[in-house]
């Protein structure tokens, strides 16, 4: 019998000249999976797929099976890999980021005032171990993780409205009913952001129960959270997944390997089960990530890399395309500031917080920055000197009125004028009281402007060196606290940061990272500080309140009104009114240079990559939004 199976396997391989193997059913599969079916190790492909699998249209052409995709990630959080492989939310952004498309959720229906929502899950999706995926996997996350006080998982953004939690009811195995205490018309959009919302919220209950103290002999929920968390979920070979590739090997600080999920629930337009590519082999460097990306790319050791190429290395990378057998594609980075300078309004020193709330102090910081110098030295003149004002692609800026407003916002307080900066500081009593050459606080005590900078973010470090020179030049004694990203994040959540410098993402309006312009979410990129945002999201149960009547409270109030508006056009008009607070009371958070081009290294035979991408949009999850399951290696070219 073993001999017969081996011969059958040989025949299957022989008829797969194009890399596509028929299973004598409706759908085709990869040769390696066909071998497993022939050996009795897997059910036929038609039985592994849903009755109505999601059909993905290839960007260029029907692909070929096979190959190992080599890339580099930026650390133990495996963030770049997750933005590629872990993007399976309720709905998914279209490739041009103009709206959403069905994904795990196939149908949905709202009531008239957007307080009740019924969603239909795609029937027949299976986890990578073959276990069925149902709404119970979502309900385990909600009931046994979010609502369980013994599990440190907070209710994520969008699940509370004005501080009150939603409720969820199971209708059947594939239907959920959501009820909200107030109108919540953007819930599905919030649920579909990036790799860290509903992509994370649907967990394999049958697997996760073994780590839950309520269902096992586990002493606490540490292992449960470790298997769930954003920074650790790709560290567990064998953990069932819904993604195109599943983790098969992980070595801390060295390597991450993922192989195709035999139960992946998508096919191409010819009925071939995706993904096309067999596996991903990800290098996790300990040293300079940007330098390694460039070196490995030039050496021909990268197949597709959408993040990590330093702008200053682009000429070198382009020059070596032929030798490295790759092409360089430019996507829009979409960043509104790199670095983005974030004053923290939840800092424990009230004297510093007093200064942060003074717009004259923030305006002085902004006018003292020589943005043109930063652009020429660190961005090869390819960026734009500008103020923080979100990404130009945001829907509310697409009208004539919206575009004009955007330009006004982007230019506000962004001109280099150190004399004006000094006058503003003088006007609020930030003067050199003791004659040592440095300006002091209004009460006469020494003032240090301390900026936390993630050491791994080389462009931000380089640019903050220049900004320190600018601030020092107007008498502000500036200290750069260059520490690891994880420590910066910990300090951010605990409120220990005075000012944070960060390479910004692409964000807009009310869907993609609204918390960068209004403090409504307790996350690391919340304007004003995570604890200010957490205060809003928890209804005042956690965090730090903004000062009454302040611009931060005004922004929170504006957001509360906005998310209850059902008509999109009315909502966008009101949104511009909310943004006006950033001009009238700004800058509330400070931009520098932005709109950088983003270079991708793509192997010459690596196909089906779209021309458009918005790389800095973590909520959009590029390249995950580009459907990497349909990327393939052209083995005939």
Image (spheres, rainbow, N blue to C red):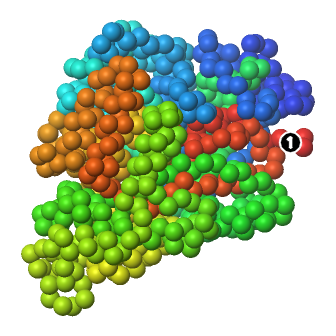
The residue positioned 48% from the left and 29% from the top of the image is 89
Q: Residue at (25%, 29%) from the top-left corner?
A: 561
* Figure quadrant of residue 568: top left
Q: Quadrant of the N terminus?
A: top right
SS for dot 1: loop
Is residue 442 visible in this depiction of the protein? yes
Q: Nearer the viewer, residue 539 or 350?
A: 350
Task: Choose between 251 and 35: the one closer to the eye.
Answer: 251
- Across and down, in percent, residue 488 comes to 34, 62
Q: Is residue 227 left or right of residue 343?
A: right
Q: Position of residue 391 (x, y in %)?
A: 48, 45
Q: Residue 317, how many percent across, how many down?
A: 72, 64
How dense is the environment of label 1, judged by Cα within 10 Å: few (below 14), some, or many (20 and up)?
A: some
Q: Is residue 444 left or right of residue 99?
A: left
Find residue 507 and report its image quarter: top left
In this view of the protein, which residue sits in the foreground, 506 or 401?
A: 401
Q: Which residue is mark 1?
A: 635
Residue 150 visible in the current orientation? no
């Amino acid at each position: 019998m073993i001999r017969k199976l081996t011969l059958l396997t040989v025949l299957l391989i022989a008829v797969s000249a194009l890399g596509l193997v028929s299973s004598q059913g409706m759908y085709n599969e990869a040769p390696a999976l066909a071998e497993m079916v022939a050996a009795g190790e897997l059910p036929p492909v038609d039985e592994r797929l849903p009755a109505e699998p999601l059909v993905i249209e290839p960007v260029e052409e029907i692909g070929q099976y096979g190959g190992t995709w080599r890339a580099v990630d930026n650390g133990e959080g495996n963030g770049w890999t997750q933005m590629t492989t872990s993007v399976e939310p309720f709905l998914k952004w279209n490739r041009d980021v103009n709206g959403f498309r069905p994904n795990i959720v196939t149908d949905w229906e709202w009531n008239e005032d957007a307080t009740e929502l019924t969603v239909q899950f795609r029937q027949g999706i299976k986890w990578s171990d073959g276990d069925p995926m149902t709404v119970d996997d979502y309900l385990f996350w909600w009931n046994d993780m979010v609502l369980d006080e013994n599990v440190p998982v907070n209710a994520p953004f969008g699940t509370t409205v004005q501080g009150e939690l939603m409720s969820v009811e199971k209708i059947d195995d594939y239907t959920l009913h959501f009820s909200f205490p107030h109108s919540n018309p953007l819930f599905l959009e919030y649920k579909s952001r990036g790799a860290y919302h509903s992509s994370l919220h649907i967990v394999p209950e049958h697997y996760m129960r073994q780590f839950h103290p309520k269902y096992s002999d586990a002493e606490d929920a540490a292992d449960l959270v470790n298997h769930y968390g954003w920074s650790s979920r790709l560290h567990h070979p064998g953990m069932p997944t819904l993604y195109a590739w599943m983790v098969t090997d992980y070595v801390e600080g060295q390597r991450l390997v993922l192989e195709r999920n035999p139960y992946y629930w998508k096919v191409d337009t010819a009925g071939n089960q995706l993904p096309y590519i067999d596996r991903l082999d990800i290098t996790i460097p300990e040293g300079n990530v940007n330098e390694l990306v460039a070196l490995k790319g030039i050496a021909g050791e990268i197949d597709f890399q959408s993040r990590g190429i330093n702008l200053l290395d682009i000429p070198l990378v382009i020059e070596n395309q032929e030798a490295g057998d790759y092409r360089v594609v430019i996507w829009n980075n979409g960043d509104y500031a790199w670095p983005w300078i974030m004053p923290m309004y939840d800092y424990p020193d009230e004297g510093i917080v007093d200064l942060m709330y003074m717009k004259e102090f923030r305006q002085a910081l902004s006018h003292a920055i020589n943005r043109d110098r930063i652009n020429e030295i660190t961005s090869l003149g390819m960026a734009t000197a500008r103020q923080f004002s979100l990404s130009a692609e945001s829907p509310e800026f697409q009208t004539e009125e919206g575009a004009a407003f955007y330009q006004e916002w982007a230019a506000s307080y962004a001109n280099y004028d150190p004399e004006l900066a000094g006058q503003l500081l003088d006007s609020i009593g930030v003067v050199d009281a003791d004659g040592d050459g440095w300006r002091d606080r209004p009460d006469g005590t020494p003032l240090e402007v301390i900026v936390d900078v993630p050491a791994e973010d080389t462009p931000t470090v380089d640019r903050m060196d220049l900004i320190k020179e600018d601030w020092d030049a107007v008498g502000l004694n500036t200290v750069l606290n260059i520490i690891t990203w994880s420590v910066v994040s910990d300090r951010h959540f605990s409120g220990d940061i005075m000012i944070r410098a960060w390479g910004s993402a692409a964000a807009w309006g009310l869907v993609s990272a609204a918390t960068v312009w209004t403090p409504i979410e307790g996350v690391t990129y919340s304007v004003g500080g995570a604890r200010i945002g957490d205060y809003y999201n928890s209804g005042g149960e956690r965090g730090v309140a903004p000062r009454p009547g302040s611009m931060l409270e005004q922004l929170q109030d504006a957001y509360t009104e906005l998310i209850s508006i059902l008509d999109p056009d009315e909502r966008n008009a009101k949104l511009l009114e909310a943004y006006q607070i950033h001009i009238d009371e700004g800058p509330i958070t400070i931009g520098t240079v932005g709109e950088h081009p983003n270079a991708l290294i793509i192997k010459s035979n690596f196909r089906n990559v779209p021309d458009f991408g918005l790389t800095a949009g973590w909520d959009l999850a590029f390249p995950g939004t580009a459907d990497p399951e349909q990327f393939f290696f052209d083995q005939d070219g």
